[in-house]
Structures are given as structure tokens and as C-alpha cells.
Amino acid sequence: MTARARKRMSTIRRRTWALLGLLSLVAAFVVTFVASSASSAPSSHGTLGTGIECTSGPSFSLKTSTGYISQPDGNSVFMWGYTTSTGSFQMPGPVLCVNEGQTVSVTLTNPAVGGVPEPVSIVFPGQSGVAATGSAGAVDGVFTKEAPPGESVTYTFTAEEPGTYLYESGTKPEKQVQMGLYGVLIVRPALGALYGYNDPQTRFSAEYLVLLNEVDPELHHAVELGQPYTITTRLPRYWHVNGRSFPDIIAANGASWLPTQPYGALVLAQPYDPFTNPLPILVRYANAGMDNHPFHPHGNDLRVIARDGRLLRGPGGEDISFMDFTRTIASGQTYDLLFRWDDVDPWMTGGAPVPVTIPNLQNLVFKDDMTFYSGDPRLGCKGELPVGVTANNLVGEYYLPWHSHAVFEFTNFDEGFGGLATVVAILPSETPEGC
Amino acid sequence: MSEEGNRVSKRPIPSTLTRADLLKLGGLGAAGLLAGGAWAAAARGGASSGLSAAVPTRVGRAAAPAAADRFLQVAATDGYMALPGRPAYPDPDVYVFGFVHVDADATVNELDVFKGKVQQPAPIIGIVDEDDVYWTMTNIGLVVRPDLDDSHTIHFHGFPNASAIFDGVPEVSIAVPVGRSFPYYYKPHRAGTFMYHCHFEDVEHIQMGMQGVVYVRPDSPYKWAYDDSATAFDRQFAVHLTEVWTTPHDNLEAIQETIWSDYEANYWTINGRCYPDTLKPNNDPSLPSQPLSALIQVNAGDRVLLRFINLGYESQAMQLPGIAMTVVGEDASRLRNSSGLGTVDLSYETSTIYIGPGEARDVLFTAPDFVSPGLTDPGNGKSYNRYWLRNRNVHRLTNDGYAGLGGQVTEVRVYNPSAPLGAQTHPNQTYPEFSPPQIPGTSPPAYYKNPWIVF
């Protein structure tokens, strides 16, 4: 077996693992929600293992840590990361959730043992009036106060504006952010935790984080070996959503086989219905990388409602949100978007047969002899798949990828259908008649 | 007979229809069949004038129109494209994959003549809001790499709320192997500029050239980009940006693998051509695989719609010095809040169209007054003023480093109104333009290349 073939087998095995995780998520959703009366939207997907898992504030005690993450092609990469003071190494840092108006304090300790062997810090882009006080050995860095090994710094600020923000290292950021010292801060509006902003139109049924980054494993290897870190040689080989590369990203939060990468991003949605499913899904994009990433959701356009933690409003307060089928997220930028899927044609009611004859599936190709396709073009219906094709579909749901359209980023090193991507699953709200 | 009366009735299972059935339904008898969507247009009532794939007008259409059925087919194959300055080794032409337009009801056995006759980029496809679009894709295989039995798909990029089976992502639906067809179906519910590409081994197949513009026009007798008179235009041009990284093309031809994270483009194209080829007219015989011109020829005072798409893997910054551009649509949504339902016009005037991979912009400009004496166009003898449309990422104004200006550059030619250009009958019209190469032995003539399929 060649190295390439081994790698491919490894990818396929990993994909199978990810699929198992995904299927358990969808199955849980189906059992707890679809099979119920579906009279109310789920308040949270957190208990089902996907969606945003908050570390709640307003006071946070973080530390630095080092460890390894796992890539779908079998590689592992040495990283530096933020974690909670009682936690173990994780990538990315904890999702810090606070409420508008709260005084937020973040104490960062850089342990002498197990921490980062150089001064570290946190900056909070989008926050104003951040004050920093340090322990006796803390030092003033270029951008903020820093904690050398064995020291700590406490940053305090008032969370004045609701929205999605990055937090990241302010020390040698070309090295430390690339090494993994970054995370997301969510400021919830005064209107309530089920709203993105102080506007009733921003109420959501569920929320998801899409936190982007790119990884050059050669740079990480240099740091691991104590060799020079030369940023000008940077050539990303992996791309992350929430610290994982596709397809790992569709496995559950806290999947046991990704012990240092706790956050998934499988998006679960159901068709819009004005009575039973009226609320959209809130998607929070944040780009912690150095490159701009054009992110393209299949399924439906997303409404861009906020940029860098500010609701899109004109000078007279008018709504200036807009629809996009690709949004380029600049380095360091965040966007908040609303997603809903409309059964406009309609594919689910059972009254509208697809107006073409789908060829015999034996005469078509299922890539790698597996598919997410149900065997029936209608939402909620299942058909027969050819013998030998592994069926990953549970109840006739649709799976649609959301991915970088700089398509070389939609890979793991050299294997396609990986990297900077996740999947949305469109689940039927009932089994339509006539399947 | 009214136009309504001529329209083909809606049929639930078009794959069982033959072209002859359609023509009978249209009451037209033996209308000639052509390359292009012309036969379908003919079935709608334009029989005698069906030879040109003209943008049909909807004057006289009933107040509450029924959706029309639109049939088209593309075939997936391979071939070579020309890039200026490319050295003789390994090959002066570059190996590519692509989609070509073929007769809508041709079966796979009738498509051998198209094998290896690739087109770059894939044809512009223009369809109508709320129509039923039956878009067949047939995989006729690769001539240069017959060992490479790659499947293909159509992904209608930006098309909302499709069934997964029509979304074209092979891992979550199906792919079409060599020798097979698949009937994609789309019913657009809004106007705007979209794009399409193959999603099978996407990083490779998109780069290899399986990409094109598809736009939806409003169901209106007027030339509007959106259902909004503020988007009226006299002439429209697709401006399809992409890049070529020749390494994987040469690797594929030489049966080698590519590491995609090494991506490093060395040619930048508009409508599949690098400057100076961008200026050559449509169907120029010197560019047999690249029939779509990037030249923008307009009369002084014309309202001009540029439909920008970017299916490369890099962001670009297109400028048109001397002429202000107004962005009226983004990603096939009119730039108004609430997706066109709102009251706030978000259009903006700009000198730079910054456009990322997978993004689209609908851009209007008014051609300035003609200033004498201008230049003389050797192709048509008319006088014009010259403006440049080019990428402000100026390191990309090169053809792989070979001498002279190259890459994503073309001209906007504004003609003297005393000897104006004729009205535009199809997108990206050039004056003059060549006929596409005819398939030998076909009568009435059929053609290898059809750069635009417009309904």
C-alpha cells in the first residue's frame, strides 16, 4: 500500500467515524423533535450535541496550554491554546458568553509548567476601554499587558455592544494566533439570550458558530522542535471550522475521538413554517485566520444582519441587511447571519412529484460507495439505494455543504471534500404522504 | 395564433418527450434545429427567426403568464485551450475539462461528435424567472484521459432551496458517470446573476474549467436585470473571472497527482481568455475552444449591465477607469434591504468591484459621450473611444510572466453615435462576430460551439 493509499484509507475511516457521529446527532434530533408534535422550535441544540456550547461569564479564569489536534488525514498538529483554568488543552479557546452591559473580567494565567514558554496575552477586538492588570512579573507588551511563564494578567471591560467577537493573542500574533491562541466572545443583547441583537427580527431558534482558521503544519512543527518560526514561509495545508477540519466538523460536540477539539458545527434546520417553525437560525461567522475566506452556503442564501458586532442599520435606523450566497469574511472579521430553508417548490408536501424522471440509481455514481442521499428526491421520503452503497440517510433529510469557495481550502492537504466546510441537514418536519 | 397558444404545454415528464413532439405541440411542423436554445424558442413561436439565439421579447404576453418549459442540455468532455505566451513544452495548449452545449434531446449515442471539443468557459445560460428549466447534463467522457472515468455534476451555485438531488454535490446526492445523463430541474423564483460548475472532485474539476455563468431574467418584456426599472439596460455582458494554474492541467495530461494546497495560479482570464485574446470577437477562429469574447462594445449613452462572476479561487478587484460603475445586485439579490421587498436602496457607485470566489455582482454604467476623433475599429470601420476594464491586482496583469500586458484586461469601446452599433440580440455581442464552426455533414447546420443559450 502506498503512502497515498494509506492516507486515503485513513481519510475514509475518519469520514466513517464522522458520519457515525453525525448520524447520532440527526437521530437524536429526529427522536426528540421531529417525532414530537413539533409544536415549538427547539430552544437549544446544545443538549443534542451540536450548536454553540457557551462558557458563561462574566468572570472567566483562563490559562494557556499546549497539545495536539487530529486532522482527518491522520496527521496531528502541535498547538498552543486557551482553556479554562480547570480544563485541559482544547482548540479553539472556550466560547465566552456574556450579557450586554456586564463588566467582564478575563484572568489569563500562563503556567510555568504546561503553558506557553514565552509571554502571552489576550486582546479583544471590538471592545473598548479594556484595562489590564498583571501579577508581579507581568510585562507591558506592544499591544497589551503580557503574562510570561508563571504569571497572570486580568483584562476587564464593559460588554457594551451585543454581537460576535474574536478574542486572540496580542503577543507576536503572527505566531501565537497561528499556533491557536484565539477564541470567540459572544455578547448577548439586553432583549434576551434568544436574540442576536436588540431587535425582535433577530430572534433565532438555534445558533451555530463558524470560526475559521488556517493551519500551516510546518510552522507548528518548527515551534514544537524549538526551531525558528519564519512567517514568510507560511503555506496553509489545513483549514479549520471551530478547530476541526471537515469532515470531523460534523461530528458531535465533545466527540470522544476528538478529545482536544470539542466544538462541532453540523447545522440542523427544518423547513420554514409560519406557525410551527417561524424562527431562523443564527449563524455567527468569525475569521481568526490571516487569509480572507469566501464562505458559500448551499441550500439557501443567508441574510447578513450584522458585521463586526454591529447590527446593519442605516443613519435613520433603517434595516440595511441583505442576502448573500457567498460572503467573504476578511481576516479578523465577524458576521452574523440568519438562515432559513423554504420548501417553496414544494418538495415535502407529497403533492408535488419531482417533474423529471430520475434515472435508475444503478446507472449513477455514489462517490466512495456511500451517500447521504435518501434515494428519493423529495424531502422526508426514502427510496432504495443500489446494493453495496452505504446509506447514511435516516428520514429522507437533505444534506448540503457550506464551504469555502476558494476551493483549494475545501481540502485536507491534498484530499478533496475536507477542510474549510461544514454541512447543513434539512430535516422534514413530518413524513409526507405519498412517499 | 397568439403567443400563448403557441407555447408548449407543461409536461410532467419531459424526458419522454422528443423534439418532434415538441414541435408538433407548437404547431410548427418541421422547423429547423440548431445549436443553441433556438429550437425551444422556435417551439414557442419564433420558428422562422429561430436561427439566432436571440433574447426573446415578451411583448404581448398575457397578464398572468403561465410558466414556460425550457429545455437545454450540456455535455461534459475535455480538450485544450490556448493561453498566450505559453511555451512549447510540455504543450502550447492547456488540457482542460468543460461543458459544451448540445441539442436538448440528443441522446448520449448522438454526442460522439462532441468528444474532445471542449469549450472554455461553459456556455452562458440565460433563463426566465418562474419558468420550468429542464437542464440535462450528459457525461460523454474524456478523450485525452480515457482511463480517467471521472463522473460529473451540475451545481447551480446560489440556486436556493433545491432538492439535494439537483444540487449537484456527489457526496450528498449522485454523480453522473461516463455514458450517462441526468435531468436537472430548476424553477427559479428570482432574477439575478448566478453561476454553475461541476462539484465532483470540485477543486480539480472547477479549476479544469467546468464553470459558467447562468442568469435569470425577470419575466418582463423589458431588458431589466431585476424586476425593477432602475435596473434597465440596453446591453448586457457576462464578465466571468477565473484563474488557470497550469500545473494540475499538465499533471492531469501527464497522469500525475496534484497537491491542491500548493495552489498558485499563473494565468487570469475573463470569459476564458487572457489579454490580448480578450479583445478578439466571438467565435474567433484562432481560439477554437474559447468562443466567448470579453470585448465590451457599446454606443455612447447606452445603459450597460455587467454580470460579474468569480469562479477562481482568488479575490479580484476590477476597475473601469473613467466610467463610474453602480452595483445594483449582489449574489443575485437586488441591493435593497429585505431582499428587494424593502424600501432602502443599497445600490452604490464605485470604481472597484471587489469580488471573492463564488460571488456575483450586477453592475450598471452609462456609456459616456463620444469624444472625437476617437480610434477606428479595424473590425467594423467605426470610430470609438477606448476605456479599460482591468484587475487592480496588477500583479495579475500578466500571462505567466511572459513579456507584455496580459491577464484580466479588456476594453470597453464606446462608439460614435453618428455610426452606432446595431441593437444587441444576445449577451456579449461583438461587432462583427464569427459563426461557430459547423459540424461536418449536418443539414440544417449544427455547430460545435454555442457560447450563449438564452431564453
Image (cartoon, coloured by chain):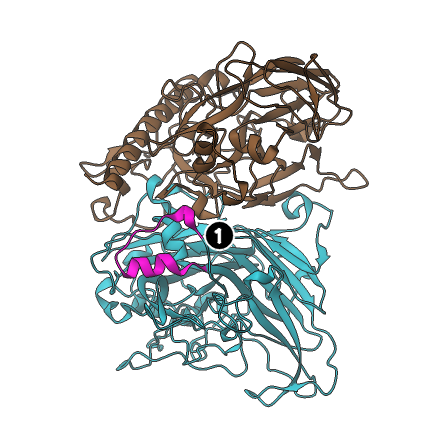
Q: Chain of mark 1?
A: B
Q: Which one is nearer the viewer's eye here, A432 or B356?
A: B356
Q: What residue sits 55% from the left and 37% below the top?
A: A289
Q: Residue furthest front?
A: A227
| Chain A representation colour | brown
Residue segment shown in magenta: B244-263
Say above or below: B70 vs B412: above
Describe residue A212's horizontal placement relative to residue A354 as left or right: right
Relative image position of residue B306 (x, y in whole percent): 60, 64
Instruction: Mark yes or no: residue A353 visible.
Output: no
Is-magenta flag for residue B248? yes
Toward which corner of the image does residue A98 lie, by quadrant? top right
Q: What residue sits 61% from the left and 42% below the top?
A: A330
Identify the element where label 1 is drawn. loop
Which chain did the image draw in cyan?
B
Q: Which one is nearer the viewer's eye here, B54 or B75?
A: B75
Q: Residue furthest top?
A: A86
Describe residue B76's horizontal placement relative to residue B158 as left or right: left
Judging by the rendered image, the residue that carries numbered circle 1 is: B313
Q: Which one is nearer the viewer's eye here, B225 or B417?
A: B417
Say above or below: A294 vs A282: below
Is-magenta flag for residue A288? no
